[in-house]
Image (cartoon, helix red, strand yellow):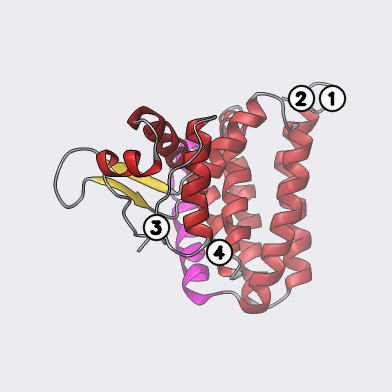
Amino acid sequence: MAEWRPVRQARTHELVLESIEAQVLAGELKAGDRLPPERELAPVLGVSRSALREALRVLETIGVLVAQAGRGADAGARIVRHPDDALGRLLRLHFALGSYSLHDVLEARVTLERSSFEAAARHGAPDALDEAEELLVRLRAEGLSAADFNDLDTRFHVAIARSSGNDLTSTLTSAVRESVRTLILRALEAAEDWPATAAALNDDHTALLRLVRAGDGTAAADLAERHIRGFHGGLVEGADGSGEA
């Protein structure tokens, strides 16, 4: 049972965050646990309910808490583990604000995906590789729109990363790809010959999965880098002289 203590009044919502974080780090709060109702937790912490709500909103944004309005068994705030969407949203905003250049994102993708393809070739989880195989079938569907292709393409790369057995690599792969989702979609939609572009990308996907299943991690990593630099690299070359979008 988590033990709650009053917090200092300065920068109240940040101190509430520190208190909740301390409970998580101490193992007193785990994924699936519910926080006490606001009317109970606020006075125990010695803060206003508005300050408590502000802290809870921050935790929702970073993907470690979900709040259900209303009454009943499902109402209230619950600790969860949803880092993928939160990290993707954060990176997308910082990319849009110019915190990272398109070149930075490209190099991060290359590093992450070389690692994940090498690891997948060594000990890829069969269920994730089977999912990647199913995604390839869907990627080759006739008349697939650029938007749907973009979504399935992302899922393919994330499935490979997940098969590597490293959850953090999988999450970061998803987040980095999500940060440039709009730019990649625009480039797909602007392709002069969309069917040919899709076919070429899918040829790479098919070869990548074949190399992973064959256990050839070095060749898979090299092809993954060429695959990423070939398309994503074109976005960098099309940006301004600084490499930023």
The residue indicated by pointer 4 is 162
Q: Amino acid at mark 2?
A: Ala
Q: Quadrant of residue 33?
A: bottom left
The residue indicated by pointer 3 is 3
Q: Quadrant of residue 217?
A: bottom right
Question: Looking at the image, is mark 3 or mark 2 earlier in the sequence?
Answer: 3
Nearest the eye: 64 or 238: 64
User: Which residues fall within the magenta stretch?
Assistant: 125-150
**CB of mark 4 within 8 Å of CB of mark 3?**
no
Alpha carbon distance from label 1 to label 4: 33 Å
The residue indicated by pointer 2 is 239
Q: Is residue 180 visible?
A: no
Alpha carbon distance from label 3 to label 2: 53 Å
**CB of mark 1 within 8 Å of CB of mark 2?**
yes
Numbered tag placed on residue 29 in the rendering: none
Q: Quadrant of residue 215?
A: bottom right
Question: Looking at the image, is mark 1 or mark 4 earlier in the sequence?
Answer: 4
Which residue: 75% across, 63% down?
A: 221
Q: Amino acid at mark 3?
A: Glu
SS for dot 1: loop
Question: Looking at the image, is mark 4 or mark 2 earlier in the sequence?
Answer: 4
Q: Amino acid at mark 4?
A: Arg
Q: Amino acid at mark 1?
A: Ser
Which quadrant would the C terminus be assigned to in this image?
A: top right
